[in-house]
Image: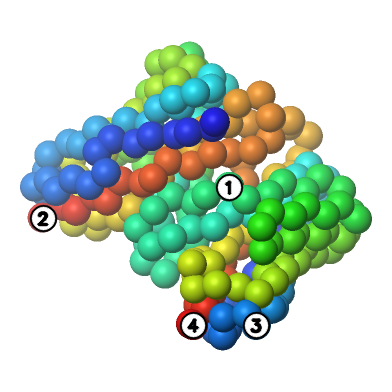
Amino acid sequence: GAVVSQHPSWVICKSGTSVKIECRSLDFQATTMFWYRQFPKQSLMLMATSNEGSKATYEQGVEKDKFLINHASLTLSTLTVTSAHPEDSSFYICSAAGWGYEQYFGPGTRLTVT
Amino acid sequence: EDQVTQSPEALRLQEGESSSLNCSYTVSGLRGLFWYRQDPGKGPEFLFTLYSAGEEKEKERLKATLTKKESFLHITAPKPEDSATYLCAVQAGEETSGSRLTFGEGTQLTVNP
């Protein structure tokens, strides 16, 4: 149980275009979903927290207009990187929390902006 | 501000050589301490949740313990497949489920055959 999927697993896009990443909880209802960013050899950096049906809460320094988060249902959250630039290239990971304390992570999405 | 510090940053063991990873924390109102395993290019895999000092949990060759200031992840007779980065995270504050985690920087474990 507690499986979280992400799609796509990797994506290459051109500078200036937008990319959407999906995060799904497959076997439980996620009251809260989280989006993280991870650079090589570093730990996870929380970008934003989203609750189903409400606006996401962004961490300090994260541009909400650049990283659009939609949590439309209890099993789906999306992260859209708008007008992507090479510095946005990173490993993006989502996690989902149900009614307990644990967060379960997706497999991650590798974004490369050329 | 919640702080989590993991040590060592990297650890090399021979297969069968038991050891421990440390996670020390400073938080206001600990609600839970979590251990995850992360393989290169993958998302973290949940291992354990510890809620109160004195609690212990085991899974195969791994055992996690918790005190009021730190947690240890003991690895008994490790195998090469235990090689990974082990992440410690804490959840604190007044919120209950669905609260944010504060992560440590991780310990990169390599087990040589």
Q: Nearer the viewer, residue A31 or B74?
A: B74
Q: Which residue does the numbered mark 2 point to in the structure image?
A: A114
Q: Which chain does the numbered disc 1 sit on?
A: B
Q: Nearer the viewer, mark 3 or mark 2?
A: 3
Q: Point out the image quarter for the N terminus of chain A.
A: top right
Q: Which residue does the numbered mark 4 point to in the structure image?
A: B112
Residue A68, given in percent of the width and then of the height, sits at: 33, 31
Residue type, mark 3 in image: Glu
Q: Is residue B18 above or below residue B28?
A: below
Number of residues whose C-alpha sits closer than 10 Å to that of mark 4, classed few (under 14), some (14–19) or many (20 or more): some
Residue A50, given in percent of the width and then of the height, sits at: 49, 28
Q: Say whether mark 1 and mark 4 are on the same chain.
A: yes
Q: Which chain does the numbered disc 4 sit on?
A: B
Residue type, mark 2 in image: Thr
Q: Say whether mark 1 and mark 3 are on the same chain.
A: yes
Q: In whole angstroms, how far apart are the C-alphas of marks 4 and 1?
A: 24 Å
Q: Secondary structure at mark 2?
A: loop
Whether residue B7 is visible: no
Q: Which residue does the numbered mark 1 point to in the structure image?
A: B46
Q: In whole angstroms, how far apart are the C-alphas of marks 3 and 2?
A: 45 Å
Q: Nearer the viewer, residue A78 or B42?
A: B42
Quarter holding residue B104: bottom right
Q: Is residue A84 left or right of residue B69?
A: left
Q: In whole angstroms, how far apart are the C-alphas of marks 3 and 1?
A: 24 Å
Q: Residue at x 35, y 58 (%)?
A: B41
Q: Nearer the viewer, mark 1 or mark 2?
A: 1
